[in-house]
Image (spheres, rainbow, N blue to C red):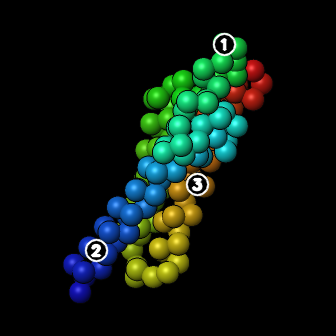
Amino acid sequence: MRAGRTLAKVGLFVAAIAFTGLFFINYCDFLYQCGCTFLWAGAAMECNIHNPHPPHCPWCVNTTAAGGALAFTVFAQAAVAFWPGPLNRMRALGVFVVSPAAAGAAGIAIGLATGYWTA
């Protein structure tokens, strides 16, 4: 029984990572209004990093910052997915809700640290 619950949590976590990977670039545009869009619709082709003058999206210009935000987001999803207790609807919802919340928190911190909104 315990192994089955662990396997179910792993499956939930994998689905959550796929969700984050698919929509992470959309979080970028939501936070920074940079012009990025869905991966299948041009991704960063319209991002403000292609403009000659700032501001330039801190995630698109600095992949280390974006990677840190992604890692923070995935870590938060892992914490929700593998927290002790039963696998239920609230946990399943939480693992997906924490994706934009954690990415948003990391993105705001990165935007403030880089002065994005003051450029």
Residue nearer the viewer, 44 or 69: 44
Residue nearer the viewer, 36 or 117: 36
Residue tagged 3: 100
> Residue 47's x, y, as percent?
61, 29
Amino acid on which the number 2 mark rests in the picture: Thr
Q: Answer yes or no: is residue 79 visible.
A: no
Mark earlier in primary sequence (2, 3)? 2
Does 38 sit left or right of 78 as displayed? right
CA gap, disc 3 and disc 1: 29 Å
Residue tagged 1: 52
CA gap, disc 2 and disc 3: 24 Å
Q: How many residues crowd mark 3 within 10 Å: few (<14), some (14–19), many (20+)?
A: some
Residue located 58% across and 46% down the image: 26
Residue tagged 2: 6
Amino acid on which the number 1 mark rests in the picture: Pro
Which residue sits furthest top? 52
Q: Which numbered disc, 3 or 1, marks the residue closer to the eye?
A: 1
Answer with the quarter of the image where residue 13 lies.
bottom left
Does 57 sit left or right of 77 as displayed? right
CA gap, disc 2 and disc 1: 50 Å
Q: How many residues crowd mark 1 within 10 Å: few (<14), some (14–19), many (20+)?
A: few
Disc 1 secondary structure class: loop
Residue located 55% across and 30% down the image: 45
Amino acid on which the number 3 mark rests in the picture: Pro
Does 88 sit left or right of 58 as displayed? left
Mark earlier in primary sequence (2, 1)? 2
Image height of 73 relative to 78, above or below: above
Residue located 30% across and 79% down the image: 5
Residue nearer the viewer, 40 or 67: 40
> Residue 103's x, y, as percent?
56, 48
Mark on residue 73?
none
